[in-house]
Image (spheres, helix red, strand yellow):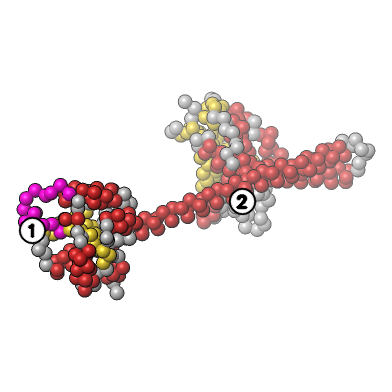
Amino acid sequence: MSTAAQVRETLPVLVITPTGSDGSITDRVLSKAGLSVLVCDDIARACEHIKGADAGALLIAEEALSNPVGRDLLRALGEQPAWSDIPIVVLTAEGELSGALPKPISEVTIHGNVTLLERPVRIATLVTVLRSALRARERQLDVRNNLIEREKLIEAERAARQEAEEANAAKSQFLATMSHELRTPLNAIAGYAQLLTLELRGPITDAQREDLERIERSQRHLLSLINDVLNFAKIEAGHIAIENTEVNLSEVLKGLDEFVRPQLSEKKLNFTINCPDTDVLACGDSDKVLQILINLLSNAIKFTPDGGSIDLRCRPEGEHILLSVRDNGVGIPKDKLHAVFEPFVQVNRGYATPQEGTGLGLSISRDLARRMGGDLTVKSVAGKGATFTLALPRAK
């Protein structure tokens, strides 16, 4: 059975007539034609069905549109949902459509979806008009169902988004709390190791001094990992303060050497800085710019083989200042480039052993760059090194 036929059988035609006998006759005639009929004894009952949107159409005789009935009907029509406009068929007196419409009929036609049939009317014509009205009502119900489904989807999406935000906030809070808790014993480890190194607890042997240096290196490495997690949690929670001011990049680059020189010397890497002699001014946060550059250089050192080279270049381009860190290491496979900035993702550029770290450094660096109005991008060819470029807005 078709959907239209199901609608015609299940949604009733509301019938309002001047007398009960007229209603009974109409019920028998329309029921024989396969229509579901509900004869309403008064307008109040019909209005309830109209407002409840559980009727297919309304058939009303002109004589039933007395003043109170008309007012109640107009009120019910005005209170329909936005998607609803119930079809109304009004049976008028003979010859009435050839002249000006009486006020009750005119008001209903203005405020409702009305078809006027002048009596005497053939039963076949009446049935055809009502079936057409029921098909129109079916389309309205389809719109209603689509709106309901859409609202359910929106509500489900809203609930899922809220749940995800709450879970993300809980995760960030957990990371921040654990990072703080872990830093306390690590700082104690560093303090006691330094006390022993300074021989404040008594003399130590060369072998013991080497062991203490290993303890301190491991402590610093673990502390840097924890700081990465803490910074990531702060960024996700929006707790990282960015001070966008004029930054002299020439001065920032001069301060880099002290942070990376020990790592460079250990691997015998050649490191050069190419920057204009004049001051290069960008808009950003000098501490955050330094943090990003140290991270980029640390990565380059990590993935560049002993005796390789690393180059840092600074140049203006359009509305930005570009800071590029290029190494001649093993590079990054093309299918991995999109993943290097994802949090907790490590791209194994060495292909042999996994590199140490949280996989947060580049993610944090890109977030910091974007918060300063810039960006961090990468270009690489496997086997030929990688170039990370920090773009910052030029100072006005």
Residue placed most toward the observer, 266 or 163: 163
Q: Which label sits on residue 52?
A: none
Can residue 3 be seen?
Answer: no
Q: Is residue 280 magenta?
A: no
User: Residue 121, position in %: x, y?
Assistant: 11, 64
**Res. 284 image quadrant:** top right
Query: Which sits earlier in the primary sequence, circle 2 or circle 1?
Result: 1
Residue placed most toward the observer, 108 or 228: 108
Disc 2 versus disc 1: nearer the observer: 1
* Residue 138 vertical position relative to residue 174 in the rendered view, above or below: below
At x 82%, y 38%, the residue is 191
Q: Which residues are magenta?
A: 89-104
Can residue 207 be seen?
Answer: yes
At x 24%, y 49%, the residue is 68
Local secondary structure at mark 1: loop
Amino acid bearing label 2: Phe
Q: Which residue has dot 2 on it?
A: 344
**Res. 152 image quadrant:** bottom left
Q: Which residue has dot 1 on it?
A: 94
The answer to whether residue 169 is left or right of residue 221 is left
At x 31%, y 49%, the residue is 79
Local secondary structure at mark 2: loop
User: Residue 201, position in %: x, y?
Assistant: 92, 38
User: Residue 29, position in %: x, y?
Assistant: 19, 70
Amino acid bearing label 1: Glu
At x 54%, y 44%, the residue is 387
User: Residue 382, position in %: x, y?
Assistant: 55, 54
The answer to whether residue 44 is left or right of residue 189 is left
* Residue 51 vertical position relative to residue 271 in the rendered view, above or below: below
